[in-house]
Image (spheres, grey):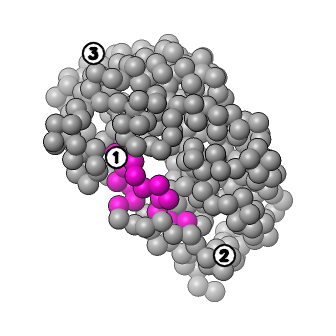
Amino acid sequence: MNPVLHFNGPVWRPPYESTSQLLQVTSGCSWHRCKFCTLYGEHKFRMSPMNEIETDLRVINEFQPRAHRVFLTGANPFVLTTSRLTDIALLVRKYVGKGHPTIGCFARITDISRKSVEDLKQLHHLGFDHLTIGVESADSETLARVNKGYDAAEVAEQCGKLEEAGIHYNIFYLVGLAGSGNGERNAAKTAEVFSKLHPASIGILSLTLFPESQLYKEMQQGLYVEATEHERFDEMICLISLLKCKTHILGRTVSNPVPFTGSLPTDREVLLKTLMDAKSRLSEDSLRRYRDSIVSL
């Protein structure tokens, strides 16, 4: 048996999925219109044929017999129909580990909206849990500005459906996305929505624009003003100060010049002190040099 799995597009996974077995079921992004994103380049969205998925699962069964969790790759595999995701989950059960392996993947808010609560309960029963959602913001003005394809009310509604179905989820917030002068408004509006939900974790990333993105081009044309690095600290401080939900805050990514992690509400003061101390200690110029040194996320 050829031990090479089918991966024919960019592959990304969250840090907390580092021990999960990767399995390609889609590649590229079905939306591919967010103005800031360059993760999938010119790669077109593709669904992997079921025979290709099963072939890969046979390889996993032979070479990774102790696998206990599978992370489906692609920008948003949860866009697939409930029927197709069910078929994939049944194949995962057939070939992966013993008992009932769990399944994670990236999902868009719009992917969840296409599924009923009953659909979601069925998928949860088959192992889908701890989905990862790049929400980026829950401020409708910011979401519209960067063409995310949904608004704040939909974030609340669709995450609420996951909770009703028993599916845990992790969300990401993108600092700086609202542009200069708008960060604290974005943070406050987002905190208001997130505080009504129960995310397992909130990953905090900082916007890093690359020339290939539409938002970078708009910045060059004077249509968008990038948030300063100190503004980003103020935005993170505002968000963490206002969040009322019990969750984990994950800020250890290359996009953040100062890494931080903690739990809310227990570590709120420690997190705030870390960010406030960093803002007072680090100059705008040094932080900008760090941002400009980032070549890949």
Rounded to the nearest angstrom, the CA distance separating label 1 from label 2 is 32 Å
- Residue at x 78% of width, y 66% of height: 90
Q: Give whichever of 114, 131 is nearer the camera.
A: 114
- Residue at x 57% of width, y 44% of height: 109
Q: Residues within 10 Å of mark 3 (few under 14, many from 20)?
A: few
- Going by the numbered disc 2, the residue's amino acid type is Met
Q: Give whichever of 177, 152 is nearer the camera.
A: 152
- Residue at x 22% of width, y 51% of height: 211
Q: Earlier in the sequence, mark 1 or mark 2?
A: 1
Residue 37 shown in magenta: yes
Q: Which mark is residue 280?
A: 3
Q: Which residues are magenta?
A: 26-41
Task: Determine which residue is flagged by label 2.
Answer: 50
Q: Give whichever of 210, 65 is nearer the camera.
A: 210
Rendered location of residue 111, percent (x, y): 60, 50
Q: Nearer the viewer, mark 1 or mark 2?
A: 1
- Going by the numbered disc 1, the residue's amino acid type is Lys
Majority secondary structure in the magenta region: loop
Look at the numbered discs 3 and 2 and tell me whether their residues touch, using CB distance below 8 Å: no
Q: Which mark is residue 35?
A: 1
Q: Earlier in the sequence, mark 3 or mark 2?
A: 2
SS for callout 2: helix
